[in-house]
Structure formats: C-alpha cells, structure tokens
Amino acid sequence: MQTINITPNPRILEVITNNPMPPINAICELIDNGIDSFGGNFSKSEGNSPLIEVNLPTSREIDNNIGKIIVRDNGKGLTRDEANNAVKAGYSGNEPIGKLGLFGMGFNISTGKLGKKTIFKSARKEDKKVFCITIDIPQIVISNTFDVPIEEIPKPYDDYSGVEIEISDWWEEGTQNYGFIKKLVNIGGPKLSEQIGRRYSTLLRKNLQILINNRKCPIFHHCVWDKKRSVERLKHGRIPARIDFSEILRTEKRCFKCGSLIESSLLNCPLCYNDSNIRITECKIKGWVGIQRFDDVNRFGLDFIRYGRAILIDEKEAVFSWVPEETGTKLKEYPVDGIYGRIIGEVHIDHVPTDFLKNDFQRTSPEWLEVIKYLRGESSLLPETQRQFNEPENNSPIYKLFQGYRKVRKVGTTDMYIGYWDESKGEPSRINRSEEKELYDKFLINEPGYGPGDDSGWWALVERAEIRPTPEMKECPNCGMQNLKEADRCASCGNVLIPKNCVECGATIARSDLHCLHCGASQVPEEEEEWICNSCLRKNPPEAYRCRKCNLPRGTMDVLKEEFLKENSNLIDYLCVDSLSVELPGGVSMSSLKLFAYYVNDNIFLQRQKEKFRLPAVVHYNSNEMHIYLDRTHPIYNKYQDRPEDIISMEIAKWIRQNYEGRISPSDIPLWSISNLYYLIHSQIWAERIELDSEIITHEIKEFFALLRERLPNLLEQDAQRIYENLDEHEQSSIIVQLHRNNLIYKQKELIEDGGYLEYVPDELMIHIFEEYPDKFFDGNFWEEPYEKLDVPDTQILEKIKKEISSKYQRCLEDMLSFVEYRNPDTNYIRKIDQTLRMIKEHLNYQRKKIK
C-alpha cells in the first residue's frame, strides 16, 4: 500500500485535538472547507446548486460506538497534492486571506475532537478515481509514525466531484474529548439546522444549500424596519431606522501565502522571500445597522461576518460599552433605560483576523479596533458622558441610532413602536409580548405586510397607536342625527331607534323605557315566583322586597360576581400575560397560567352594600385562567402607594401555594412562603416594569435634564440675551466653562446673542432660569399643562394657581437634581424620586417636532 507523510511536528495531532471548541464550531469548520471549494461561485452549474450535506449519527449509535459523521460538498474537488496538504496538521500553505476553512489546523482540531478516525475523500470531475486518506489518531500515536494510508477507490458516478469527510470511532470515557460528539447530536436536528442557517445566511441567500440530516438549513432574516422609516429628533433631525454602509477603510499590502502585512517599500515578503503572492487588498466594511421591529432582552446586537460566516452573533459588548480614558472603568451604554434593546445589524469585515478556532475576532488587532471606531465612534454614546470627559463629537451609525431610538418612551411614530390607543389611559400603549410573538410568527412565514421585505403591516400598527378610535355611530332615519350605536332613542328628535312593544297596549316604545309613554303601564314584569338574591344566593318569597338573609333590596346586583365585573371593567393590556410561568422552589414545574387584569369602572366599588369592607381586587378563576379585577380608586393604591403589580403578585402567590401544596417537600416548606413566592413572581414577571434601580433612575433623570437643556434655546429664544445679562458673575462663569469644555469658546459671543449658550447651562442654573421664566415652559411649549391659558377670571386666584404649578415643578426638578448628586440609597427615597420623575414626564409634549 502507498503512503504519504503528514508530519510537520511530532505528536502535534495528539496535542491540537485537546483545544477547546464549541461542538457546533467543529461542524462549521468542516462546512467552511466545503464553502471554500466553490471559490465564491454559488451559481448553478450544469443544473446543480452548490450543496453541502452533513449527516450525523443518532444518540443511540454513539452509545454503541457505531455510526458516522459525513460532511460532503459537490464542489470542484482537490488534486492529490492539495488533498495531501489539506490534512497536514498545522500546514500553512493554504492562502490565509480570502478563505474560510483553510483546512490544516482547523480541520485537524475539529475532526480530532469529534472522533478518533477520519477518512478524507476527494475527486475532480476529470479524475478517474477518488483519493482516500485515513487519519486514525490512536493508531498514529501507538505506531509513533505519521505516515498514514492513502488509497484510490472507484467513483460513485462518472462526473462525481467534491470533498467528503467521514468521521467515526468516538472517544471513550476518560479521554478529554469524551462526550464531545454527544453534545453536538443532543442539540437536535431542527435546532442545529436553525443555528447553522443563522451563521451562513448571507451565503444561503446566494443559492448555497446546506442540509443537516436531509433537513434544509433555513435562511435567517433580521426583523428590521425598512430604511424608509424614520423618527425625528429636534437636535439630530431625521434618523432612518436602517443605515447602510460600504466603505473602504484603507488599503494594505499583504502576502497571500503567509498572511504577513508588507511594508509599502518592500517588493518581496520578508518571510516567504517571494513576490508572486503579494497583493494590494482593500480593508472594507459593509453592511447595515438598524432598528428591530420589536425589543427583546437578548435578541439584539450586531452580527459580525467574515467571508459569509457569522463569527459573532448578537454581539453587544464591543459596540454598546465604553471605557473613558480618564477612569478606565467600563460603562454599559445600551440599553441603559431598561433591559430591552432593539439595535441590530449585519457587519461584513473579511479583512479582520480571527483567533485560530474562529470563536472570535482578534479584539486587540488594529483591524478590529478600526471597525469598532467606524461603527460607534471615538466617544461615548451618552451626551452626558461626552460632556463630562470632553470627548469629541460623535457621528457614527450606532450613535445616530442610539440618539433616535434609545428607548421607547412614546408608543407610535414618535419612537417607532407598535401599539394601540388605550381608551382607559387616554394615550397610546404598547401591545403585549404575546401579540408581538404572533407578529414575529407572521414575519417568519413571510406573510404579506409582515415579512422580511415588507413591513407595511407592522407600520400600520405603529400609526394605529396614535389614532383614538371613534365610537360607532348610527343615523336617525327621521332627522339624520348621528347617535351612539347603543342609543335606543334619538338624542335630537326622540325617535325610537331600538324598539320594543308595550306589554299592555302593544305600542312601540324604546327598549330602555320602564313605562309606556302611551298608556303609562310599567314594563317591569311582576315576579310571581321565588327570587334568588344575587349576593348571597338565598331564595326569597315573591312578596319580599329585601333578601331575608342579607337584607339587600330585590334586584341588587352583586358587584363581586364575575358576570357583573366583566360588563363594568376594562382590560389592562399591559398587565395581561398570555403564558405566565414561574420557576418554583425545589425544581417544581409550574404549568402556564393565563392572566387577565382589569380596572373596574370608577363609579363601582368592590364592596357589598351590607359589608363595610372595600376590596382592592377581586379574583375569579376559570380552568387555567386568572381574571383579576382592580379598583384603582382604592386607598391601597393612592394612599399607601401599592402598585397593581403588587396586588396581582400576591394573588398569584396564593394561587400557586394552593395548587402546588401537595408537591412541596418537607425540607422546602420555608421556600414556599407567600413572601418568597411574591418575590419570585415580582422578579420573573414584573422586573422590567417595577424595578427600582437607582442607576437607571439616575440615567433617566440625566436624560430628562439633557432634553430640557436641548429645548431651552427654542423656549427662551426671545429672552436669551437678556437672561444672560441678568445672570450674576458666578453663573456667567459656569456657562463659559461649559463652552470651553465643548470647544465652543471661540463662538462665545455668537452663542450668547442667538441663545445657543442655553444648551450648555449647568443643571442648577437651568432650574433657576425655570423659576424666573415659568410661563415659557407650559401651555404646550415643554409641558402640556395650562398656565397662561388657565380659564380663571379672578386675577388673584389665577396668580395663586400659577404659583402653585410652578412651585410644584420646581420642587420636582430640585429633588431630581439632589438625587443625582447625593445618591441616597434609601429604597423609599428612590421610590419617591421615581414617582417624581414619572409625574414630571407625564405631561411632556413629546409630539412637537419644533417648538415655536
């Protein structure tokens, strides 16, 4: 038998197979080699599409040490010498620039980790035979020789071409790679196909097909808004929801044999001593960054792609963190106002080097740092941080998106988020997460208006959020007056719209009439039988006016009954949970619960007439559904400041304890206290809504002051110069210092004249200006609350009310500033400031694009 020698270094195969690598990366290494075989051409050839097939053994076959991994492509195949070099451990003859797989090191690590024995097969169309090289790692170690057998076998058919890699003989227990193949197989065919499809989607879109156990890997599409969508920001203008880019960062001279960077003055590679492989290459970045149509805790961030394979998926750390040079402390910049993010993107950077296992890019390389600088700029994304450390202006793509879409404050077109008009709140509200999932399901099946290339259906839901629904009307046939749909008599002419017949004379009267307008007969039927009290269910004789048990008048409706509550309540969409499940103590599995929350109408108290106790909530159960009705006027909400989430969590905790009592082990009983269950529900269900994080509140306060400061030049345009002249020397000096820190001292005179200096006034001075000119901030200018437009004829009372309004807002501003400066850790104080911030932001005029 003929042999070839694959020994670059003694025992290298035994050593390199112990390198750490995620199981899916091992398969990706072999897929990369198949992709390289097509040479970047993914068009159909002689009727065949470029195809890579991966077949994996079953879990049972692995347990019995049988089965094989087979990875095959229908590319052009390799020559005998190319095949020899391909399997050499550490071989560096493959061009390291412009390819994914490179065989060599990555091939040996991935195959060696998956199994002990690898058979490498290859042939071209013009070859008469298939070359087969067998690498048996234990046999190599035992024989102490790296001469491995090569043989030729017949082609399966005449025009066969491509490479096939067959791996078998799984590592036994006690070896370092034991269980590696099992971890790969346990991912499961559907999930593995989905993950492979995500990594190679940019190539799958070019006609390449990858099959995992005959399952086609799906093409992944980002659920991104179209570039024609945008938001308007006062300072930054129109900011599109998707920013595309394609830019050559620089050109460089490289050796395509060893990958070395060559000085422009040199003609030969200093390592290879050859000029035939030296080329001028473009270091190019292309792709896009944009806004996802929904926000998510995990599904956001950028995909970084090299030659069609996503090396990093949903990367956040590199683009959403910043380290100011002055402190050296890393700051998380996005998301900072909550836990949900929606900035996404695809960034192609073929020139940036990766580590040798392609788990990550080389993050200290100049190429990587250059890419990050292009994407997110040379300064913080947070304006406050920029000002604090005197950082340069930032115009990067990520910075623009951050300024436009930092968080969802206003559902609808203002912040570009889907929602609906909430009649109970009188403002737009976001839809719940289960509805978002339904929309994403439509996206996945490419339903018209919802798929990757068409966001019109999603956009219609964004616009819908700002449209107050008009009540359904009907026209009176007699006078043409428009009446509400439920009206049974015309409000203008009295014509009957919904008729019934008088029980006595048969005349036509309105449905709600209790007495006939013609004969005066009562329309309320007389009870001749026993009647049942709606409250206590006691049967009473026909002549009884009041219930003989609870003394309630006959016909009194029990407001605590579900039938009554459903008729007299409004659903609180943002407190409903379609599939509520909590991770319970002791590993107990909880079946999902559907939660429906309602506010009862304000004229209804959750209280029976005879009983003095008024309830904050009433709960009704229906199979796996919980319907909870809340009386928002109850003192527990407005006097004692409990939140609806608190009451709901308490009721769910009680329900869990009652339903899972029999599954609590004696040792776990302390873990099943109502207080602990209450905490688990709070932390797992409501954390995003109710978490009192002083850092988040601090960021929101700083953001509010930044917004106010940004609006000042327009609010005070006519008075800006006079305001500056009336400031004392210390206050004027504080403004000059801020202009200097922002490199604007040379424009000092111009900024004072046109009011531009107001964007740089310190927070404390800004509050002082508000105190002097409160009339400039109300009546829809910054806050919607009326001030000069108050309709109060008595001048003294008017001035008193105006003083109370301005004083209230001033105290709020001072409390917020004090919180930022002194950071009191007391929970009650944090809650107070959170409520202060919510109150002062409640009447902000977010809709105004310009302030007149």
Image: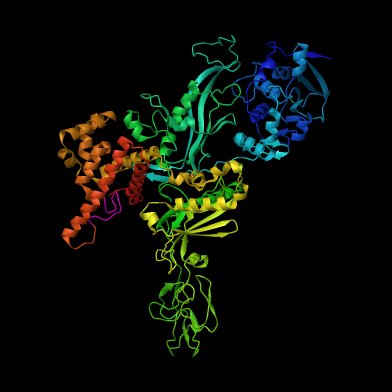
> Which x, y percent locates residue 703?
35, 40
- Name the foreground residue: 407 vs 702: 702
| Above or below, 639 relative to 828 | below
> Which x, y percent locates residue 128?
82, 24
Q: Name the quadrant of the N terminus.
A: top right
| Above or below, 167 relative to 526 | above
- Name the foreground residue: 83 vs 738: 738
> Which x, y percent locates residue 679?
49, 44
Which span is picked out in magenta? 777-788
- Name the foreground residue: 341 vs 93: 341
Q: Residue at x 34, y 39 (%)?
A: 702
Image quarter for residue 518?
bottom left
Q: Main secondary structure of the magenta part?
A: loop
Is 296 one of the magenta-colored residues? no
Q: Residue at x 79, y 22 (%)?
A: 132
> Which x, y percent locates residue 120?
75, 23
Image quarter for residue 696?
top left
User: Would you say 450 lies left or right of 807 here?
Assistant: right
Is 780 one of the magenta-colored residues? yes
